[in-house]
Amino acid sequence: MDRISVPELTGTNYFIWSLKMQAALSLKRLDSVTTQMKPEGLSEKDASEWQQKNSDAVAYIKLSLSDEQALQFAAENNAKILWDKIKSTFTGQTEDRKIDAGNELKNLQINSNELANDYIARARGIATKCYSLGLDVSPREPVYYTVRGLKGKFAKVRDILKTQRDKSIDEVLEILREEETSFNSPSSTSAEGRSADVFYCRKYKNSGMRLCYVCRRPNHVAKDCFYRNQKESTTTSQRRKVHLNNNSKERNTANPVFTASPNEESLCENI
């Protein structure tokens, strides 16, 4: 097709195939024969020209079909009828696949022991499937469902990423890779420390400084962040006060304390 690339129609990519085939036929000035039947009363010259366009359009369409689909439509030689038959064959199936693809994206979850690369590749594949079927998916949705599907060792990263809505799918992948590397590092001793250090303290792409993901300031790591430690200290202090108050109440209830008057104390001493 003179460098015009149209994907092969396999039965699962009708929407994208139809879109590109229409564009290719339009560039070849052949799209008119797929939208209307042969007009009546054409002159011999015009009729011959129409027949040539029809034959060329049929050839272009059939050459873009897979072997299975080509056999199914082999007998049809009218461009409009061929186009309509292909459309009617796949339209109903496409609607069902749209629903399935949408549900697959919404229910996306990382599998046990699945690598970050494989999970993101699977998420991208589902998003591409949605786009190819003509599903109205915003750029934010694949990232949202990908983050929401994290669990297990990535649960902590998931909770933090939920608050950072400006992340792209590539940035999410980079963070998951670093988190994954930290869990596989033999030199790491604390799972919680590994998670915090790797996630919060990623390097700038264009500099050697490290960025704290708690306060978004450089030159220190998250575990040493003043704001984070202050928050944790306040939370711990509050919990300790509640715990002490509860213990005090329990002791007073279980072992009531009686107070003596000064005369009683004096009498006790004399005895």
Image (cartoon, rainbow, N blue to C red):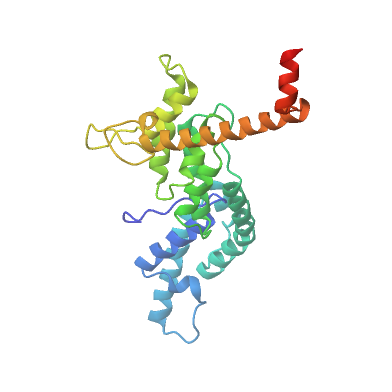
Residue 270 placed where, x, y %?
A: 73, 13
Residue ranking furthest to the bottom: 41
Residue 139 placed where, x, y %?
A: 44, 54
Residue sitting at x 45%, y 28%: 195
Residue sitting at x 40%, y 50%: 166
Residue 72 in the figure: left or right of residue 117: right
Q: Nearer the viewer, residue 242 or 117?
A: 242
Residue sitting at x 24%, y 33%: 209
User: Relative to residue 31, is residue 96 depicted above or below?
Assistant: above
Residue 60 in view here: yes
| Quadrant (top left, top right, bottom left, bottom right) of the C terminus | top right
User: Relative to residue 193, is residue 166 depicted above or below?
Assistant: below
User: Relative to residue 74, is residue 271 depicted above or below?
Assistant: above
Residue 16 placed where, x, y %?
A: 48, 56
Residue 16 in the figure: left or right of residue 74: left
Residue 30 in the figure: left or right of residue 240: left
Residue 64 in view here: no
Q: Nearer the viewer, residue 191 or 3?
A: 191
Residue sitting at x 45%, y 33%: 117
User: Relative to residue 26, is residue 106 depicted above or below?
Assistant: above
Residue 152 placed where, x, y %?
A: 57, 31
